[in-house]
Image (tube, rainbow, N blue to C red):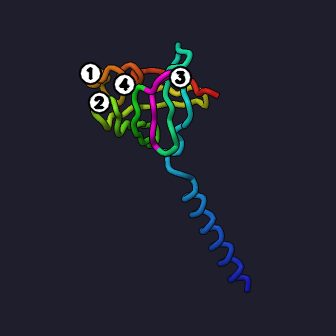
Amino acid sequence: MKHNKWFTLLAIALVLSLTLTACGGSKASSFPTGRFIQSGSQEYGMTFNADGTFSVGNSAAVFVTGTYKADDKIFTETSNSGGCKTNVNFNYTFDGTNLTFTYVGNPENDADCTGRYADFNNVTYTLKK
């Protein structure tokens, strides 16, 4: 009987461990969503949605839309309506309020995409509450 209790406890611990690991979420879930305003601006910024879509603009207009994925601390723009090349990677940091992007690799390789270059080249955004 004592053996069965230990086996049952071990089985419960194993199932709980697997459940917690599975529910830990993907690293992509750590990327923040919401409206972020660019430092130095009153309203220009980006909106990141949980479904992997984003938009760039202000209260008067949306300038660019697209899709993204985020793994670990890498943000990848996977599509955009601005005609720029896709699958461009950026490091990001988020402290709960400020979201900062820097290019993975040489930023000058993306200088032809002037809007993205200006928006992601070591730029910080503040979460609008």
Callout 4: helix, strand or loop? helix
Q: Mark on residue 116?
A: 4
Residue at the spot 40% in from the left edge and 39% down from the top edge: 67
Task: Give the residue pinned by disc 1.
Answer: 112
Q: Is residue 89 above or below residue 19?
A: above
- Gap between marks 4 and 2, in whole Å? 8 Å
- In the rendered structure, which amino acid carries the disc numbered 2? Cys
- The span from disc 2 to disc 1 (Cα, nearest Å) is 8 Å
User: What amino acid type is highlighted by mark number 1?
Assistant: Asp
- Per the rendering, the mark at residue 102 is none
Which element type, helix, strand or loop, lies under badge 3? loop
> CB atoms at circles 2 and 1 under 8 Å apart?
yes
Q: CA distance from mark 3 to mark 4?
A: 19 Å
Q: Is residue 59 magenta?
A: yes
Q: Residue visible at 51% across and 39% down?
A: 49
The answer to which of marks 3 and 4 sits earlier in the sequence is 3
Residue 128 x/y as whole percent? 61, 26
How crowded pointer 1 is (Cα within 10 Å; few <14, some 14-19, many 20+) is rated as few
Question: Of tags 3 and 4, which is closer to the observer?
Answer: 3
What is the tally of numbered marks visible in this picture? 4
Q: Which mark is residue 59?
A: 3
Residue type (three-letter) at the residue carrying disc 4: Arg
Circle 2 is placed at which residue position?
84
Q: Residues within 10 Å of mark 4 (few under 14, many from 20)?
A: some
User: Residue at point 57% right, 24% down?
Assistant: 126
Q: Where are the magenta residues, as a range?
A: 52-62
Tell me the mark number nearer the camera, choosing from 3 and 1.
3
* Mark 4 in CB contact with mark 2 (< 8 angstroms): yes
Name the spot of residue 66 as percent of width and height, x first. 39, 36
Q: Secondary structure at mark 2?
A: loop
